[in-house]
Amino acid sequence: MLLEWWSGTECTIFTDPRAYLKYGKENAIVVLNHKFEIDFLCGWSLSERFGLLGGSKVLAKKELAYVPIIGWMWYFTEMVFCSRKWEQDRKTVATSLQHLRDYPEKYFVCRHQSSCVPRAPAGL
């Protein structure tokens, strides 16, 4: 993994060993604890480890769509952009998940805890 080699970063997965055997063979929604600005690189590193980099998707803040190069790339690779308001994001997230249901490759959706957290009202 380029990130791990270049920066000396270690990306560690803590999981049930039975679940680990399915990684890369099934679709996944992954929740990462977002602490630093480059955490998305760890998500990419993990998806690369399981051969899913081409099918990796993220839920990201809407503002990131306007960042030159990376924002544009994310837009054209069908990343999901959230406004962080559940009333608006509910439909966006539901529609995006419907599109992923028919996605031709295995996918790996990363959601960083503080990156895009549309909070559902109590009872949903």
Image (cartoon, rainbow, N blue to C red):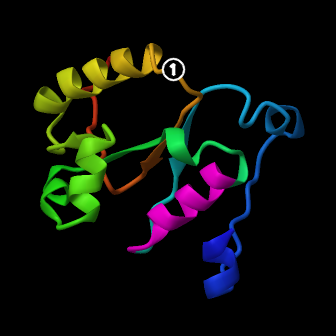
Which residue corresponds to the image point at 68% horizontal and 25% vertical from the top-left?
26
Q: Which residues are magenta?
A: 37-48
Pick the quarter of the image with the C terminus.
top left
Q: With 83 as the anchor, is 28 left or right in this view?
A: right
Comparing 36 with 48, the one in front is: 48
Say whether residue 42 is magenta. Answer: yes
Q: Which residue is mark 1?
A: 104
Residue shown at the point (42%, 52%) measured from the top left: 113
Q: Nearer the viewer, residue 72 or 35?
A: 72
Label 1: few (<14), some or many (≥20) within 10 Å?
few
Q: Vertically, is 92 above or below 124? A: below
Q: At which x and y percent is residue 4?
A: 67, 76
Q: Position of residue 58 (x, y in %)?
A: 39, 45
Quarter occupied by the N terminus:
bottom right
The amino acid beneath tag 1 is Pro
Name the residue: 16% across, 50% down. Answer: 62
Mainly helix, strand or loop, the magenta region?
helix
Task: Examine the rendered structure and indicate whether residue 93 appears above or below residue 49.
Answer: above
Residue 35 locus on image (x, y percent): 45, 70
Q: Residue 68's x, y, as percent?
A: 17, 67
Secondary structure, mark 1, is: loop
